[in-house]
Image (cartoon, rainbow, N blue to C red):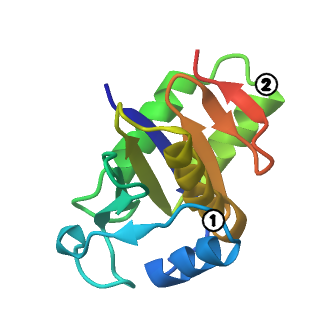
Amino acid sequence: MPYYVRAFCKSAGIPALNLVFDSINNKGYPFTLRIVENTLEGDLINWKSFEMNYKEGKGPIIVEFNVVDDEDGLAKEEIEEFLDRIGSAGFSLRKRKVIHHLKQTKYLICNQLLSDIDNDGYDANGEFMNYFVQHCEGMQQADGEGFYDSNMNLILDDK
């Protein structure tokens, strides 16, 4: 069963994929991130989705990009679903922080992790998502877990 991890980003600038991958690879991590060119829509600047291969013999991490203002995108719909799930009654400081961030989100990165993912895949996904947290004012969310701050401390659980 697939597992989803998202980064809700508030920055207006959308990074080119080559900058994201250069940043990750320059940190010297032991895995190699490769783009499967025939699944990339557009170029490295105007990307919508692609498959990220982190290890031979393992399924890819499926990456999708959606802009909130895009008519065909799912970002606005996903944000509304999360806002409904969080609810408005009994606003805690943590709820307010997440709600405020979601309402300011300009775009959403959604990664689908397949059932055969291993520790290298979780590392690859973590580094990829961390780029958006650190450089694009992103807040991470993981299905069944919740929302995380920039230090990967749980802010609000999904339960």
- Extreme residue in the left direction: 38
Please name the residue shown 59% across and 25% down the image. 145
Task: Name which residue type carries label 2.
Answer: Ser
Q: Position of residue 124 (x, y in %)?
A: 54, 54
Q: Position of residue 99 (x, y in %)?
A: 64, 39
On screen, residue 54 versus residue 77, left or right, reads right
Q: Foreground residue, 28 or 93?
A: 28
- Residue 147, by quadrant, is top right
Q: Can you identify the residue that label 1 sits on?
A: 131
Total numbered labels placed on residues in the image: 2
Counting from the top left corner in percent of width and height, residue 118 is at 48, 38
Say left or right for 51 vs 91: left
Q: Examine the rendered structure and indicate whether residue 157 appears above or below residue 43.
A: above
Q: Nearer the viewer, residue 16 or 71?
A: 16
The image quadrant of residue 152 is top right
Numbered label attached to residue 92? 2
> Does residue 13 appear anywhere in the picture?
no
Q: Secondary structure at mark 2?
A: loop
Instruction: Classify 104 as above or below 57.
Output: below
The structure residue drawn at horizontal position 52% and vertical position 75%, both measured from the top left corner, is: 21
Q: Residues within 10 Å of mark 2 (few under 14, many from 20)?
A: few
| Whether residue 143 can be seen here | yes
Mark 1–mark 2 CB contact (< 8 Å): no
Residue 59 is left or right of residue 17, and the answer is left
| Gap between marks 1 and 2 measured at Cα | 28 Å
Instruction: Name the one closer to the observer, 27 or 2.
Output: 27
